[in-house]
Amino acid sequence: MGIELQNITKTFGEYKAIDNLSLSIPSGDLIALLGPSGCGKTTLLRIIAGLELADSGKIILENKDTTNLPPREKNVGFVFQHYALFRRLTVFENVAFGLKVLPFRQRPARKEIRERVEHLLKLVQMDWALKRYPSQLSGGQRQRVALARALAVNPRVLLLDEPFSALDAKVRQELRRWLRKLHDEIHVTSIFVTHDQEEALELADKIVVINKGRIEQQGTPQEVYDHPANAFVYNFLGNVNVFHGRIKNGKVSLGNHHLDVPDELKNVEEKTSQTFVRPHEIGISRIRSNDNDLEGTIREVRLQGGQIGLNIECEGLDGAIEAEVPRELFINLQLAKGVQVFVTINRVRVFTGDYEI
Amino acid sequence: MGLFQRKRRNILPGFGLSMGYTVFYLSAIVIVPLSMIFFNTIPMGWEPFVHAVTAPRVLASYRLSFSTAFFAAIFDALAGLLTAWVLVRYRFPGKGLLDALVDLPFALPTAVAGICFANLYSPMGWFGQILAHWNLQIINTPTGIVIALIFIGFPFVVRTIQPVLEEVEQEIEEAAHCLGATRWQTFRKILLPHLFPALLTGVTLAFARGIGEYGSVIFIAGNLPMKTEIAPLMIMSKLDQFDYAGASAVALVLLCISFSMLLLLNAVQEWQQKEYNS
Amino acid sequence: MPQPESAKSTPPVVKKRITDPRSVQIFLVGFTYLFFIGFIFLPLGLVFSQAFQKGWSFYLESIREPYAIEAVKLTLLTVAIVVPVNAVFGVAAAWAITKFNFKGKSALKSLLDLPFAVSPVIAGLIFVLLVGSRTTFGSWLGEHGIKIIFSTPGIIIATIFVTFPFIARELIPLMEAQGRDEEEAALTLGAKGWQIFGKITLPNIRWGLIYGMILCGARSIGEFGAVSVVSGHIRGQTNTIPLHVEILYSEYNFTASFAVASLLVFLALLTVVIKGGIEKQFQKKSFHL
């Protein structure tokens, strides 16, 4: 088992950042800690690194209890959100730093250090920048150097704190793909923290969804997206329409309309509920295809690249529905603002119990 | 949790060493020596204490120090505001020179400033001669003290206003202009209130400095008892007579005033923070 | 419609600021110059005019005169001790304050402002009260042959008190702005305390440190009130340059007094120029008094 966290708790004054959290991460995996701002994910990462001390609980890295060890002895690599490159040192000296501060006995020879640094910089495609200073590099370049620096000391675990959040959208996408490729090459157990669900879904082997210091769900991206454990996870991953209503007699109300309830809730008596519908699980057509269809008018059209986002106001429904249709459909049906359409809801998830968005 | 105990949030090393040294140093250099003032005044007993600090000469010295520092601070408020405005807003020949020279009164040793102004306003000095024509005497009068203090307090006002003035958004003035305000109205109703906390801070700093000022004042003042004898000089003369208790007593009063100024300053700065964060 | 490749911002347009009418500008600038002439330029000019009143040779003589030289030596000795000592303190205090969170931090920061609220005469007074020959502590030291007040150590200690905040107050905003990230990164890479400090922190703060030391040094040289109290005013032994200037002036030896004072003026101008230069370099917006 690569990383094992047992019953971690951390409070800051009155505020409980992490609430009795336990987690197991297999060796060699790339894991995403996903959650909204303030949910405790960065705190958890820093605790694993030893930059914060947990109030209680254990941290076991590669079968070694490292709970009370200082960061130095934990052998973790940490990549900071704002890179934290040493501004007065060149790129080479930055990456070599971890090797140069090793105790005398463990320190490699100068030649060896040089080779290792050059190899790493080549790996991150920054070997041309050996003598440059961080201020001369772009954000994406700096982050790659930061990564090389963290890898230089052969860490057991690689921890990344929102590594791409400070970068432009395009650079972010490129680096994401690049990080995945890098991980596939070197296979270090890695954990990265993000609040961007797209990033988590795209990159991770496993996603751990965290909210208010607790784990809401953990699983592969597929599992978490298609079978969310609760309303929070469903809402956090991907776009969603939320409708409040009531379940009664096997049907859930959507304004004036009633839809069949998913099987698992068929036996529920009257209860308030929230109904979740994904924008791309909605069918749009010009003619009524179903008794259950809702009738509505397109109020807004959003061009989102390959998909078109539609904001539709429906009869008898409070609030509008957000739908996503492929571009071809949009063109073929000659959809536009003000056009009347029929909305088929292909799939719903219904959650009872209190959940606040 | 005890005082100075580290909240275990930070793992960087060296807290014990740096904190320990800092506390030790401050105790040895600052806290223990300052406490001597108390140790020398408390055994005095209340009545002798009051007697010492309310003797006519002492009272006169307080009055003098406070009033001269006050007027100098007011003048500095005007001159400082003017200078800060002109340096931040306008372009003119010699601007860089003036900007640099604002710091001169702060960098110049007080004794040099002292002999300078004393000489300038002495009967044979450049200014003294001119003033003699109108039968005006500056030297050996409180006015002389005020002039020296104006010099000393000037940088405090300018340097606290400057950064605030620099950060004022252009759009605010443009909006006022569009609404029909004249420049003077814009200044009076919008900019001045915005600058007020900084102005108050600068003036308070100048005032606090002026109360305790010694070197730049004693040359021009003449040090005539009851007339141009500043409070710090009172302390000096008591020391010369080995009246340690008396010197401490006078010093204690001055310290109390200075510390309340410092507290006032902190309160003003907190107010300033709230203003800018709203 | 495809989105643009990357949202590139347009180059900044330099707007002309709404400003005051020309006549008002000239008026205000004029008044400012008037103030500067009366309060800064003329006094400066006076120093040099008086210093050279009796010619070059007298000027040089006044500076080379033995007592003057002794005063210079004492002043330099003071600076040579005060600045490094306060630098160590400044670095230690800044490290403790900026790299850690603890209760009492703001109280500590306020303590650093203390000398600015204390009259220099009082600064001298407290040391007389502490280790003067008439105090218990002082007489005990006297029995062991250590004289502080009315002697060089007293001058040094009083100067330390007056100038101790300078370096700390320079470093603290600088280190706060730099944050803890780099130090934490070094920690995760395996560096130990002194390695972190020496290889990462110190290079990052070196200009702030140098600047603070210059300010501290300039102030140490010029300190008058506090030193006046603790010094014995003994020519050739316990006189710093400012005290020497005072003595000469009180003896009506004006020209010599201004001659020696001119050295201090040169130094003050140098400090002002360096300060301006460094600020331009780093475009610091706030002035650290």
Image: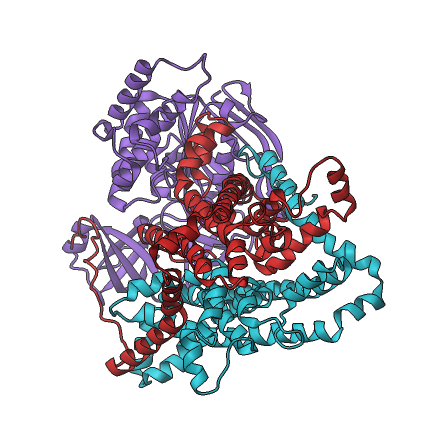
Residue B250 lies in quadrant: bottom right
Question: Does residue B127 lie above or below B243 as drawn?
Answer: below
The N terminus of chain B: image quadrant = top right
Q: Is residue C113 left or right of residue C186?
A: right
Q: Nearer the viewer, residue B102 or B125?
A: B125
Q: Nearer the viewer, residue C168 or A293?
A: C168
Give the colour scheme of this rendering: by chain
Query: Which colour denotes chain A?
Result: purple
Q: Is residue B63 left or right of residue A274?
A: right
Q: Where residue B9 sits in the image (x, y, percent)?
A: 57, 39
Query: Which colour denotes chain B?
Result: cyan
Residue B125 shows up from this direction: yes
Question: Does residue C269 lie above or below A174 as drawn?
Answer: below
Q: Where residue C25 sits in the image (x, y, percent)?
A: 28, 78
Q: Nearer the viewer, residue B136 or A281?
A: B136
Q: Where residue B237 sits in the image (x, y, percent)?
A: 68, 63
Q: Nearer the viewer, residue C190 or C131?
A: C131
Q: Is residue A227 left or right of residue A328?
A: right
Question: Does residue A152 lie above or below B199 as drawn?
Answer: above
Give the tally of numbered discs.
Answer: 0
Residue B271 shows up from this direction: no
Residue drawn at x 56%, y 77% is: B142
Query: Which colour denotes chain C?
Result: red
View extreme (bottom): residue: B134
Q: Where residue C105 sits in the image (x, y, percent)?
A: 60, 48
